[in-house]
Amino acid sequence: MLAVLRNRTYRRLFTAQVIALVGTGLATVALGLLAYDIAGSDAGSVLGTALAIKMVTYVLIAPAIGATANRLPRRALMVTTDLTRAGVALFLPFVDQVWQVYVLVFLLQSASAAFTPTFQAVIPEVLPEERDYTRALSMSRLAYDLENLLSPALAAALLSVIGYNWLFTGTMLGFLASAALVVSAALPKPTPTAPRTGSAYAKATAGTRLFLAVPQLRALLALDLAVAAASAMVTVNSVVYVRDVLGLSTGAVPLALGAYGAGSMIVALLLPRLLDKVSDRAVMLCGALLLSLVFATLGAISTAPSGSWRWPALLATWAAFGAACSMVLTPTGRLVRRSALPQERTAVFAAQFSLSHSCWLLTYPLAGWLGATAGLPWAVLCLGTIALASALLAVRLWPSRAARHTVAEAGVEHEHTGLDAGHPHLAGARRGAAVPTATAMVAVSRARGQPTGATAGDLPPR
């Protein structure tokens, strides 16, 4: 897997991602302590509101960025967002009002909503080979999991010798280092694209309409909802299970969260070789269906009488949640890459970023509210039902015929405009009715032997 780091450009971009993630982790710990200093016992509500602002910002800002990113210098865009995040981190230690926290969190997450889809769209061009790109996705998954595990530990070590305000300095330095690495990377030239016409709303939603026009990507949205149900249960209610249900100390909470991260990391390490032999569809749908089984196990833990077996069972359940979520999340970039033309990737990645976070915006408060008012068994039942229904919907939405071919041969259903009826790429295509995408559909074809992005030469610029 580490062979992809031989690519100089990817190595610098990946290092920038890791450094920025560590900085974000430090900021998360420091923000909680800052909220407690400002609001005292109301710190939980402050952080809850800040999390809601984060999700709403991702849902609203990412599509707007996706509509314009292809017409902006990508290096300048990513560097500007890094510098913006560094500036926000610099100001955070000086705030003394709750509303100031909210404003700075909005600015910080707006910059992240611009940076992440642009970064995601660049990597397939840096690593055009499917095998290399698959390994890069696993590396990114590992980076996220390691950040979840190591950033709290690093923050705890730093807090033993410095005040928490200095953690914001570490965050600022991380984003500055990320910007420097992006500047030093030789990014490929973006695929030319014609400006989109229409209203501002039409431009902002073009990526979402393209996303929803492809069956595999509609299935991905259902899979995102299944993952959001599981991750919300872990993130929101881990402390409740550890402290209230099992009666353990606070120190057991990181162990539970670590089990989730460990399960995700193990799968991320194993998936590159597996995806060389098994289709994305098989892996992702199996992961989503596994989530339902894990919810059933969690229901047994939630309702069973006290017993020493429940703590190791909870750790195993959290690890299974992490493994199943990684089975869905790790191949996501491959699916988006193969389902969109190069000039549309930034918009489609932005749509996926926005839509997936809208799922979390639904499940996070649902997990917290149900667990607090109706009890954990009802929260497990509700979120488990959502996960099962979403997985079954994804099975129905994702055309099974795409699974008949190997990864290298599989095509995806996609749209073409401007091709003559006798064009060889349309062999075996079926003519379809117009759909409300950014352009009218002339024919829907399944390209075998090449990913969708490889057909860009058949199409006029949009």
Image (cartoon, rainbow, N blue to C red):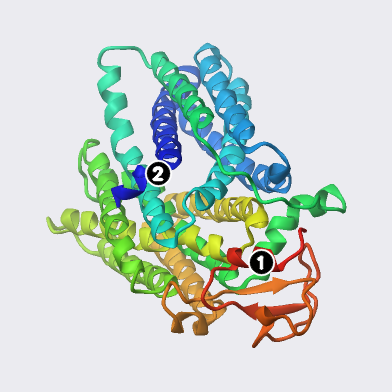
Residue that badge 1 annotates: 212
Q: Earlier in the sequence, mark 2 or mark 1?
A: 2
State the mark number for residue 386: none
Q: Nearer the viewer, mark 2 or mark 1?
A: 2
Camera-nearest residue between 386 and 304: 386
The amino acid type of the residue labelled 2 equals Asn
For the point 29% across and 39% down, which residue is it? 149
Tally of marks:
2
In this rendering, the answer to whether 220 lies above or below 345 is below
Q: Secondary structure at mark 1?
A: helix
Q: Where is residue 172 shown, x and y percent of the image?
A: 47, 20
Camera-nearest residue between 211 and 188: 188
For the point 40% across and 44% down, which residue is it? 7
In this rendering, the answer to whether 69 lies above or below 321 is above
Give the image quarter of residue 415: bottom right
Q: Where is residue 220 shown, x and y percent of the image?
A: 53, 66
Q: Residue furthest right?
A: 198
For the point 72% across and 62% down, which residue is it? 209
Camera-nearest residue between 7 and 209: 7
Residue that badge 2 annotates: 7
Image-based side of 139 in relation to 247, left or right: right
The amino acid type of the residue labelled 1 equals Leu
Mark 2 neighbour class, 10 Å CA radius: few under 14, some 14 to 19, many 20 or more: few
